[in-house]
Every structure is written in C-alpha cells, then in structure tokens.
C-alpha cells in the first residue's frame, strides 16, 4: 500500500520574526522510518527517507528517468551500513526537481541509484534518501513528531524551547581515533555512547545519530559479537528476522538495561541489534560503532539539529 500526502500540505514558513529561508515539509513516521514528503515542480509528491547518517541526496533511478534528470558521466555510490552493500549509480544535477527553490539550492547535486535493491521493507515506495548536504551545515533542522513536520531554517532562527529538553554537543570522529579519510567527513552528527548490558557488561564507544536506521540502536563492527564487550555478557537467544539484500538471515540483539547518550540522555530497556558490517570511515580507526536510529528520536516530541552551533536539542 502506498501512502499519498497531498501536495497542498507543503508550505514555506517563517518560524519566528528572525527566521529567513525557512522550509517546512510534512513528516511521515511509518514502520520505524522517517519520511519527508516533497512536492515536485510537476505537482507530484515524492517520499524521501530522512537520513542524518548520510551526506548526500539519493534518488531512485526510476525517478530520474521519469523526470528526465540528466546523469553525468562520473559514477556515484551508496554504501548502506545496515545492509553492508554498495549500490552503484550516477551523479545528476536536479535542474529544479523540487517545487521549492530553497530546497533545490540545498541539494544542487544528487545520486541516481536503484533503491529497490536496498529492500527497506516498506509499503511506501521510497523515491529517495535525503541526507545532510554540505549546504545544510549552515542551517537548523527541526523534527516535530507532534505536528508531523520537518522544518529547515537558517542560523538566524531562534526557537523558544520551554519544555524539558536535553542539549548535547555534536561530536565527530576525531575523538582520538581520527584517520585521514575520516577527517573529511565532519557533517554527520555523532557523540559518545555507553551501554550497560547486565552487571559488569558494557560497551563504550562513539555513536552516529542516524535517522535513516530503522533500529533504535545497532552495533556496527566486523568483530565477533562476544568480542565487543569488556566482559562476555548474558545473551538473549531471541532473534529477529531481517531481510539482508536478497537473502534471509537472523540478527542477534541484546536488551540493554540502560544507555547513556552523550553523557546527557538516559534511556532504559533498549534493544541493541548486532550487525556484522564494515564501519567505513565514519568512526575513524575505532573497531566498533553505534547507530542510534529513528525509534530513538521518536521517544521525543521534537529534535533540533543545530549545525551552526554544533548542538542537538531533544525535547520531551
């Protein structure tokens, strides 16, 4: 079943008297995924998965053909942590794909890939993936699960946050483990993770705030599961089914007693999935990384990604 959102829900708004260059888009939270519903110049509505763990915009190759978007000769690649697969594609210039000119300016380039191969297990057709482009570094993104909207505003905007909230710093991959390649990837929001898995059993490492991950917490490593802890923890025998590319396999997980996120936020009883996958350069030379996905963000009413101030605000 495909879910359609009327294009009239799209709006360009000023959130405060100080806000300029503000864009507001309908948010759809469905099966542990966050979708942005984006009107096109042709009057259609495209469903893009919102992914803070990516720096790029990916568009399904069928969409680039439909809208006659010109592919460039240079090749592009999508690497999915959770799937441990590479998808080849082509760069393209949008030439005004979206109805909103500000949104077009934030994403002047895109990557055309066959997204159906990701097998994201959604009854919503995924037309694209909207990551954090370099131009987004100058903006603030507000995810509002109450009003079901995502707002993109410039750095002059000031939000009046009165409710209980946690403010955490955006840290990057340079926590003593920087590599030459990871030094070039600084936009992805990250921080410190401490997970407790029973008496004396814990994981302490870096994390990525990854709205494109449909698990609340996921361990990414090539190490065996029993090697990622300071002590061997008690393991649950329960396994959850997971479609991995084009074959079925089981994914191990542990139930964390509690997680401490960036030294500020404590959440209890969190299923932590173990994914035997290549880390890439997101975590520098660290052998273990953690993804905090869409269900983690859904615990809050609003989340503010303040890239100019390198801060994330979580509102309860």
Image (cartoon, rainbow, N blue to C red):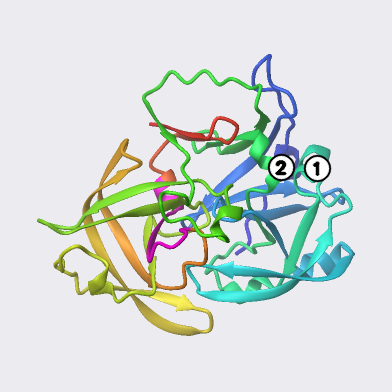
Q: Magenta stretch: residue 291 in it?
A: yes
Query: Any magenta on residue 148?
Result: no
Residue nearer the viewer, 24 or 177 = 177
Q: From this viewpoint, is residue 50 visible?
A: no
Q: Is residue 75 left or right of residue 156?
A: right
Disc marking residue 105: 1
Q: Earlier in the sequence, mark 1 or mark 2?
A: 1
Which residue is located at x 34 percent, y 65 percent? 273
Q: Quadrant of residue 106?
A: top right
Which portion, as a residue range, is magenta? Answer: 283-296
Q: Which residue is mark 2?
A: 135
Labelled pair 1, 2 in contact (Cβ < 8 Å): yes
Out of 113 and 29, give the one closest to the viewer: 113
Q: Position of residue 257 (x, y in %)?
A: 19, 52
Q: Position of residue 261 (x, y in %)?
A: 33, 43
- Name the secondary structure under disc 2: helix
x 53%, y 79%: residue: 245
């Amino acid at each position: 079943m495909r879910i359609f959102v009327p294009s009239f829900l799209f709006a360009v708004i000023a959130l405060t008297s100080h806000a300029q260059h503000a864009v507001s888009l309908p948010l759809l939270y469905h099966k542990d995924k966050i979708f942005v519903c984006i009107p096109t110049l042709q009057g259609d509505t495209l469903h893009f998965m919102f992914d803070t763990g990516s720096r790029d915009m990916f568009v399904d190759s069928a969409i680039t053909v439909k809208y006659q978007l010109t592919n460039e000769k240079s090749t592009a690649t999508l690497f999915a942590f959770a799937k441990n697969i590479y998808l080849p594609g082509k760069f393209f210039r949008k030439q005004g794909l979206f109805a909103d000119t500000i949104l077009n300016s934030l994403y002047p380039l895109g990557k055309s890939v066959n997204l159906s191969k990701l097998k994201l297990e959604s009854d919503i057709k995924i037309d694209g993936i909207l990551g954090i482009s370099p131009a987004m570094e100058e903006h603030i993104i507000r995810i509002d699960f109450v009003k079901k909207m995502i707002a993109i505003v410039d750095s002059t905007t000031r939000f009046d946050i009165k409710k209980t909230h946690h403010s955490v710093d955006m840290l990057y991959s340079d926590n003593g483990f920087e590599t030459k390649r990871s030094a070039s990837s600084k936009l992805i929001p990250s921080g410190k993770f401490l997970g407790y898995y029973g008496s004396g059993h814990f994981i302490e490492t870096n994390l990525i705030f990854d709205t494109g991950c449909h698990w609340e917490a996921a361990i990414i490593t090539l190490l065996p599961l029993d090697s990622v802890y300071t002590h061997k923890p008690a393991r649950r025998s329960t396994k959850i089914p997971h479609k991995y590319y084009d074959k079925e396999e089981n994914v191990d997980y542990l139930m964390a007693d509690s997680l401490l996120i960036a030294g500020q936020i404590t959440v209890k009883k969190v299923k932590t999935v173990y994914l035997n996958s290549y880390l890439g350069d997101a975590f520098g030379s660290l052998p273990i990384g953690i993804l905090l996905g869409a269900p983690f963000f859904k615990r809050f009413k609003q989340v503010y990604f303040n890239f100019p101030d390198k801060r994330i605000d979580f509102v309860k």
